[in-house]
Image (tube, grey):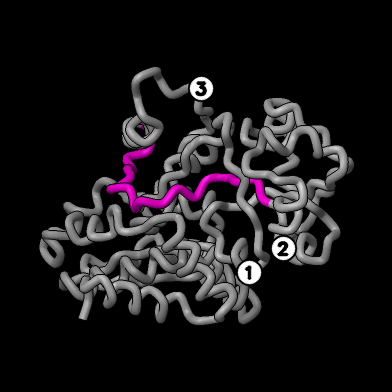
Amino acid sequence: MNRFRLIAATVLAAVAVAFAGCGDKKKDTIIIHDGQFAEMRLIHQMVKALVEEHTKAKVDIRDEMSPVNSFTTLVKGDCDLMNSYDGTVLATFLKLDPTDVPEGTTLYDFVNKTAMEKHKVRLLDKLGLNNTYAIALPQHLADRYNLETVSELVPVAGELVFGAEHEFFSQEGSMRFRPFSAFYGLKFKDTKPIDIGLKYFAIESGNIDVTVAYATDGLNKKAALKILRDDRGFFPEYNGAILVRDDLFARMKDVAPNLEEVLNMLGGLFTDEIMTDLSYAVDVDEKTPAEVARAFLREKGLIK
């Protein structure tokens, strides 16, 4: 009997763990799963600081998840919001391409309409930054070849090695290496898929010459990279914005009737340069996201 009781207890414990987070949402608490990058962590900490300063609600930032897993959790209702980008929602979450956006409609508006119809989630006001894919190389190479745009890279690509994280070389999706290089007519000396955690080391050590980066990544500044202008517009916009469940505001109306207004305090607050500096403070200066986020909001007069 003891053996069967032990098995039953083990099964019950496993079920409890499996459903943790599904039924423990409090009416006064906003749940966020943290992001994997400094920028996402910074925005989440700013959300926490603003909400707890200007409403009676609390914000619970839990362990990090990948963007895809976080979105799945958001749609299921096990978390309430996440930092995201209209380009990510389009290509990664909705599995659509920029060509699916109707003429005369912005990517942001199309994404919001489609995400609401399919998943009952929507983007709040744009934050002001465009964290799109960017082609980058060390400043000394940009100076040597006099490069400002991706098109100017074409005649010298045969002398350079392109390296990026493995997923950028995958076959899935239009925002990948093969469609990009075909679009511009780029033929590099060699290509090297590398672990994302080693990418900046690889370019700083000279193992690769050109890479794909996120436009607002603070590590671009640390590695003294030159961002080449996507002069033919291959990569779509990746406007940063807070992605929320549409039912969040009704659920929080008693403790935070002004919640949407409070979250939109972040709207238009950033430029690519501002976010690069904030990310640099986290990734290079090793300050905590909470420390950097609160200092920035105090500087802007948004919290005490």
Residue 168 point in image, percent of width and height: 70, 43
Residue sitting at 60 percent across and 77 percent down?
A: 6
Residue 130 point in image, percent of width and height: 45, 48
The residue pinned by badge 3 equals 99
Q: Cα distance, mark 1 to mark 2?
A: 9 Å
In the image, the segment drawn in magenta is 118-136
Residue 15 showing in the rendered view: no
Task: Name the mark on residue 222.
Answer: 1
Q: Nearer the viewer, residue 239 or 158?
A: 158
Q: Quadrant of residue 151?
A: top right
Is 154 left, or right, of 260 in this rendering? right
| Vertical comparison of 91 with 2: above or below | above
Is 14 left, or right, of 22 in this rendering? right
Residue sitting at 58 percent across and 45 percent down?
A: 133
Task: Name the mark on residue 200.
Answer: 2
Residue type at mark 3: give it. Answer: Thr
Q: Is residue 129 magenta?
A: yes
Residue 209 point in image, percent of width and height: 79, 52
| Vertical comparison of 81 with 281: above or below | above
Q: Quadrant of residue 123?
A: top left
Q: Nearer the viewer, residue 68 or 131?
A: 131
Q: Cα distance, mark 3 to mark 1?
A: 35 Å
Which label's residue is closer to the chain start, 3 or 1? 3
- Packing grade of label 3 (10 A; few <14, some 14-19, many >=20) is few
Residue sitting at 45 percent across and 63 percent down?
A: 33
Q: Nearer the viewer, residue 236 or 247?
A: 236
Residue sitting at 54 percent across and 40 percent down?
A: 92
Asked whether the residues under the numbered discs 1 and 2 touch, taking CB atoms below 8 Å apart as contact, a structural biologist would say yes
